[in-house]
Every structure is written in structure tokens, then in C-alpha cells.
Amino acid sequence: MSIVVFGSINMDLTAYVPKLPQLGETLQGSSYITAPGGKGNNQGAAASRLGADVKFVGRVGTDIFGDQVLKIIAEQKVDISQILQDNEHGTGIAVICVDKNADNSIIIISGANFALDDSDVARAKALMSDAKVLMLQLEVPLDACLKTAQAAHEQGVKVVFDPAPAIPLPAEAFKLMDFITPNETETEILTGFKPANAEDAARAAKLFLEKGVGTAIIKLGAKGVYYENKSESGFVPPYKVTPIDTVAAGDAFNAGLAVAISEGKPLAEAVRWGAAAGALATTRKGALPSMPYRDELIKLMKEQA
Ligand code: RIB
């Protein structure tokens, strides 16, 4: 049984800077890397490194970045047979700044990611009969995302929905989500308030449950994770690590969560898998290169049990 990822693939151009630039400011950076990213791609690579059989549905361009990212995705043992090279759109690009506190700002040029349409949905649908979990994010068109979620829902495949980057969502979208995993900013866009602590997160989670979500998981970054569904709720404190780059930590979280769910682990443990995966991702530079492996995740969870 596999995890299907329907999502974005970018080439990330990342500059490490003392602080994020202000309006009109030119800054001297300390270093620079070019490495694959994209929320979907990061989640797929991490899920594979954490032990899942991952099938990816997405698009890159026919440009040099497309060739480079495809090669690296295949090296992650992700099935790339359903990634199209689009003749009309370039590979998605992310321009990222990471400051000395490991915080970041990201600009994305969607390119081929925003060309996903019903033909991609049909290819994803064909993978559902053998899937346990579908992972979605919002760097591809919402319509395609929701149609893929609907197909998963109809076939009993669990939908793990990362509303990132957040946009207002139609009411019917929430009913298709077995799991929603917003961070603080995304929670604010979707609920109207930014959770500052576990108590706020519980309030936000209840709003998501009222909208029809199965389980709401509110990621509070370095403050931990709150989760709630109709029968249980809980809080997972953050794993203690020294962060150097928080890019894609949320993607690693979703991968840890999805892999644990696909393996039938209880919810509390699945959220801990997510938290451990997210923490590990902050200890390395880059998006895809920072995604954690299963042995390191198990070691961290044992060390900080
Ligand atoms: O979540 C991190 C990702 O967001 C980066 O890899 C970048 O490509 C953007 O999509």
C-alpha cells in the first residue's frame, strides 16, 4: 500500500542572510544553495525516506531545472512515472531567504505546478486503489486538489491536507479532509485568528471540526502541536533540537504524520512522528536535502521519549 502525493515541485534558490531584507534594502548574504523543494516534493521525499512507498503526481518543465529535480526525486526512491514534463510551463521556482534565527521568507513562481488539471486528477485517481493516504498542499490549483481529495474520499483513502500556502477554502473542502495541518499563519487565514498557544489552538481545532474535518492538527512551530478529533485531543511538546533552517519543517511534519497513519499507528504517536520529523528538518539546510530518514527519527523519539 502506498502514499500518493499530488502536489508541487520547485527548484529552491536559497540565500542565507543575517536578517530578512526590508523594503528597498540590499543585503550581503553569507551563502547560497540551489536544491529541489516544493511542498509536495518535500513531503513525498520525506515520506519515502521515512519508509513509505510513495507515488507522485505532478509536473515540471522541460527546462534544465526540470531534468535536475526529476533525477533527484527518483534518487529518493519516489515513483516519478506520473510526473509530467510540461512543454508549455517552466519548472516551479522558489526564491528563499533564511535569516540567522533560521526563520525564512519565500516567493514562489508556480510555473508547471499551476498547470495541473483534470488529466492529472485522472492519473492520481488511478493510483487510489492501492493507496492508504493522499497528501495534498495548496501550491497546485485548488480545483484539482479538491477533485483528487474527492476521489480519495470515495475510495476510503485518508486525506492529509496541508493548507499551505493558505487561501480561503469553500465549505465543501473541509468535509473531504481526514486531517488538516495548518501552522499559525494558515490557521489565522482559515479561522480569522492566530493561535498563540495550545488553548487558542484548541479553539481553532474545534472550528475545523465543526466545518467537517476529521482531525485538526494545529502546528505551533517551536511551541508544539495540538490535535483534536471527536474522540480525543492532546498536545505534543516540541522536540529539542538546534535549528539552522526552518524551511520545509512543516512538510517534514506532514510526511511523518502521513507515514505513521499509513502504518496504522495511533493518532498521538502519529503526531509525535510528525513533530520529530519537523524538528529534524530544521537541523539541516535546504528543503528536500533536510528531509529526515526513518532511523534518525526513531533515534530522536527514543532519546526524547
Ligand atoms: O515548504 C517549503 C517549500 O515552500 C520550499 O521548498 C519552497 O519550494 C516552497 O514551495
Image (cartoon, helix red, strand yellow):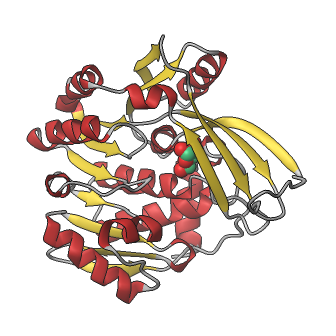
200 horizontally vs 151: left or right: right
Q: Indicate the quadrant where residue 120 lies.
A: top left
Of 18 and 256, nearer the camera is 18
Which residue lies at the image location 40% right of the left edge and 85% below the top edge?
Answer: 198
Give the image quarter of residue 47: top left
For the point 16% across and 58% down, which residue is it?
171
- Rendered residue at 51%/76% (across/down): 305
Q: Quadrant of the N terminus?
A: top left
Residue 87 appears in view: yes
Which x, y percent locates residue 19?
Answer: 79, 65
Give left or right: position of 192 versus 41. left
**Residue 293 visible in the displayed image:** no
Label count reads: 0
The correct choice, above or below, for 26 with respect to 42 in the image is below
Dividing the picture into quarters, in which one does residue 70 lie?
A: top right
Is residue 154 placed above or below 264 in the rendered structure? above
